[in-house]
Amino acid sequence: MIWRHAALPLFAAVLAACTTTGGGTGEGAQQAVLAQPASNEQQQRAKTHTELGSLYYLEGSAAIAMEEARLALAADPNYAPAFNLLAMTHMLLNEPRLAEENFQKAMRLAPGDPEISNNYGWFLCQNGREKQSIAQFMAAAKNPLYVAPTKAYTNAGICAQKIRDDKAAEDYLLTALRLMPANTVALLSLAELSFRQGRYPAAKQWIADIERLVEPTAEVLWLAVRVERKLGNREAEARYANQLRRRFPGSPEQRLLGQGQFE
């Protein structure tokens, strides 16, 4: 599995499917809440409900995730990870005002928490506030207690691309790779950045790096088709196109291929 871009507003410290984030919004690699150790019985109940709710969130069961978050807060009204879960669930439901409210509550209760900063950064990035989002990602990435700074650097790179700050985007993504060479979200983002800049051999190499790690997704195959087309490698273009048709029929990328929308 490869992280998609929206997959990087992630909860936990453990990279559950290291190779989305990406992307990204499964999209396949969302991570469960990894709360701090409980200090009392009320907090233990809150932690249990929050962790259970996060599993439902990963499955897209927003209503159950929200109910578990509320049960967590009934047990401990000051449990920041539960507000974080609520915020992410409201994001899933496209309710930005409620997501913002709950992120703010989580940050007031746990100022400087890097996982909350990372998730709030992703929220900002998805709501047209990219510069603010990068500040949140950097706060998370530079926190010495954060065990997964590669996530925050990857997210910063993705959001920097949205505002066409290509130099910063490349720096963030390369840093993410130095921290975790198997970070396929960063690899895909670098491939996309190289393609947009017309650096097709570099894009081809990033795609090859992804293929050495995981089975390529429709997103990767579609980019590979366009890269090989730009390079004039018709045999490789046809090979990737056939893979895309065979493995991902009906996908948005396959439809674009069928329509000949290569740009």
Image (spheres, helix red, strand yellow):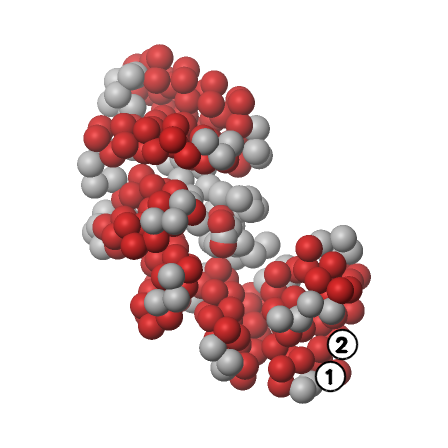
**Is residue 1 visible in the rendered structure shown here?**
yes
Label 2 with label 1: CB-CB less than 8 Å: yes
Query: x%, y% of residue 151?
Result: 38, 53
Q: Residue 162, relative to residue 41: is it above or below?
A: below
Checking the image for residue 238, the label placed there is 2
* Amino acid on which the number 2 mark rests in the picture: Ala
**What residue occupies the far bottom of the structure in this picture?**
232
**Camera-side residue: 11 or 161?**
161
Quadrant location of the C terminus in the rendered image: bottom right
Q: Identify the image quadrant of residue 180.
A: bottom left
CA distance separating discs 2 and 1: 6 Å
Q: Identify the image quadrant of residue 119.
A: top left
Q: Answer left or right for 140 relative to 58.
A: left
* Amino acid on which the number 1 mark rests in the picture: Arg
How many labels, in total?
2
Residue drawn at (25%, 34%), measured in percent from left and top? 107
Query: x%, y% of residue 44?
Result: 33, 20
Q: Secondary structure at mark 1?
A: helix
Residue drawn at (57%, 34%), measured in percent from left and top? 59
The residue that disc 1 covers is 234
Q: Secondary structure at mark 2?
A: helix
